[in-house]
Image: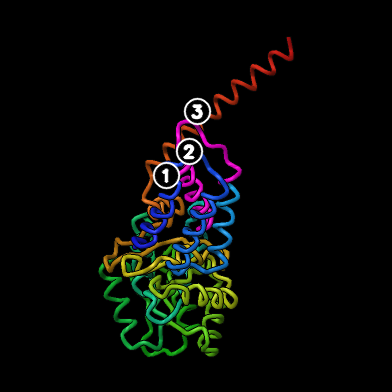
Amino acid sequence: MFESLSSKIDKALKTLKGQGKITEINVASTVKEIRKALIDADVNYKVAKSVTDSIREKALGREVLIAVSPGQLLVKIVSEELTELMGGTKEDINTKGDPAVILIAGLQGSGKTTFSAKLASYLKKQNKNVLLAACDIYRPAAIDQLKVLGEQVGVEVYSEPENKNAVQIAKNAIEHGKKNNKKIVIVDTAGRLAIDEQMMKEIEEVKASVNPSETLFVVDSMTGQDAVNTAKTFNERLNFDGVVLTKLDGDTRGGAALSIRAVVDKPIKFISTGEKMEALDLFYPDRMAQRILGMGDVISLVERAQQVFDEEEAKKLNQKIRKKSV
C-alpha cells in the first residue's frame, strides 16, 4: 500500500536534498512534484492543491535549522501536512449507551460484514459483552456469513431469517441485547448503492429507530476517488460519525485515505487489512503519514533539532531580558 506514492514523494524531496537553503525556486519545483504524486495516487485535486499550497507557504516561512538540511526540513513539513489532512489525531468510537449501538453502513462489497465481526472481536478483547445483529435481508448468504464469523470470534449473532423488515430486526436485536446484558450491539446492514433511493431510505429509517451511539461508513479503499464521492453522498443522508477503510492491503493507490477526511470532514477511525479477524487497527494519521513518507528517522531528527533551536532562542531571549532589567 502507498508504495507508488511513497517513491514519488521521495523522488520529489530529493530535489531539495543537498541544497544549501530553501528558495522559492527549489520549493516550487518540489511542491509541484508532490502535488503530481498525490493526484497520481487518486487524491482529490482540490485537496492535493490545498495541502501543497500549505506546504509551500510553511516551507518558505520556516527557518532552516543548523543541524538539518532543507530536504529534511521539508520532509517534516510534508509529514505535518499529511497528518493534518488525515485528521491530526486518532479518534476512537463512542461506546456509551445501555446498550451502545454501532450502526454499520456502506456500499455493496465494501467489507461491512467482515468488519462488523472484526469490530466485535476488537471490543470483546476490551472485555465488552457484544452482540452482532444480522440486518442484511437482501444478500442470501449474509446472515450465514455473519453467524460463521460470530462463531469464529465467540460473539452471539441475533438474526430473524424469515423477517424481511430490517428496522424491526434491528429494534428486536437491541431488546434482546438489553435482556441478555449485552453492552454493545453492532448492527450489520445491507450494502446499498447511493443512487438507490429505496435502500437509502431504509438505512435512514434503521438509524432513526435505533438511535446509534456511533454510525460507521465502511468503504473499500481500492475504489479510489469513487469512494470519496460515495462517502460524501452517504454522509449527506446519514451524517455518520466516522469512516472505516477496508482492503488497504490490496493494490490501492491510497488516495481515498488521504482525501476522505478533507471532503466529508469526518474522521477515519479504523483501517482493515486482510481477512483475519485480528487484522483491524485504529487509524493514526501521524503513523500513516510517516508510513507514506517512509522517513520516521528524519522526522525525529528535525524534531530534536527544533527542540535544541527553541532552547537556544529561549536562552538568547532570556539574556536580552536580563540586560534590559539591569
Q: Position of residue 272 (x, y in %)?
A: 36, 64
| Main secondary structure of the magenta stretch | helix
Q: Is residue 158 above or below residue 260?
A: below
Which residue appears at 34% of the width and 56% of the height? 125
Magenta stretch: give its range.
59-87
Disc 1 to disc 3, how far (Cα)?
A: 22 Å
* Residue 106: quadrant of the picture: bottom left
Question: Callout 2: 10 Å neighbours few (<14), some, many (20+)?
Answer: few
Above or below for 309 versus 208: above
Q: Would you name the residue on which mark 2 appears?
A: 20
Could you tell whether 7 is left or right of 26 in the image?
Answer: left
**Circle 2: residue type:** Gly
Judging by the rendered image, the residue that carries numbered circle 3 is 308
Q: As drawn, is 210 to the left or to the right of 246? A: right
183 in the magenta segment: no
Assess disc 1: are there few (<14), some (14-19) or many (≥20) residues with their C-alpha within 10 Å of its C-alpha.
Answer: some
Q: Position of residue 86 (x, y in %)?
A: 50, 58
What element does badge 2 sit on? loop
Measured in 3D between alpha carbons, the distance from the residue under mark 1 to the one under mark 2, in whole angstroms, is 9 Å
